[in-house]
Image (tube, grey):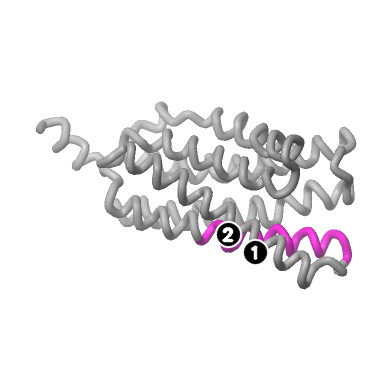
Amino acid sequence: MKDIFLNRWVSGNLTAYIVGLGLFHPLIAHGFTGNHDKLLTMPQLIMHTFSLVLFVLLIIRSQIGMYQLVGDPVNFKWWPLLLISPLAFWLGYYTLYIPFDILFLFLSIGVITARQFRDYVKFPTKWIRQCIAIHFLAALTGIIAGLGAYLLFYKGMPDLIRDIATWLTISIPSSLVIAYLLKRCLKEQILMPAEQLILLED
């Protein structure tokens, strides 16, 4: 059962970040409304937000699949990710600009995910710190890889191809960090239902 949980953690995060953020986001946000200045038009704002919601829905879908292995799915709170994470992205974008939109987005996902699973780990405080720190590291990894590749290799490419290449270069390394570093943490920390019963009896 624990192996199934860990495999879902890896596959779910890789899919959500690579497909949702790496492909869907640039295709929807930039494919339909084109490039933008710092101040987006209303259609651009709508399509960017829609693409972010799709990305977050992929994360929610994968987390529900994991959550039902350790707890009652009825207790899973989907709305913080759906509402707070896109808002965090825009807060970072319109206050500190790029790349803080990515940093704020990842940190919001890290905080919410940490709280979502804190009742099903051995050491909740340690888990919360691990989850937030690794999402922070993932954001830095993606930002450095994506912006570095953009400046060195992608800048002269056609607009949409450049955007997809940049977001894939952000999402692939960041997804690997989240999937595999947190898998190591969860392998030690996650409590499956049988282990939860033993703790309750003690």
For this orientation, the residue located farthest to the front is 96
Element type where label 2 sits in the image = helix
3 falls in the magenta region: no
For this orientation, the residue located farthest to the left is 202
Spot occupied by residue 122 in the image (x, y as percentages of width and height): 25, 41
Element type where label 1 sits in the image = helix
Main SS, magenta region, reads: helix
Spot occupied by residue 33 in the image (x, y as percentages of width and height): 88, 46
Q: Quadrant of residue 46?
A: top right
Q: Which residue is mark 2?
A: 141
Q: Residue at 54% of width from left, 54% of height from top?
A: 138
Q: Nearer the viewer, residue 85 or 68?
A: 85
Amino acid carrying mark 2 in the image: Thr
Verify CB contact (< 8 Å) between mark 2 and mark 1: yes
For the C terminus, the quadrant is top left
Answer with left or right where residue 103 lies relative to residue 159.
left
169 falls in the magenta region: yes
Look at the image and give the residue range highlighted in magenta.
158-176
Q: Label 2 neighbourhood size at 10 Å, few (<14), some (14-19), many (20+)?
A: many
Instruction: Report how far apart the C-alphas of labels 2 and 1 lie in the structure.
Output: 6 Å
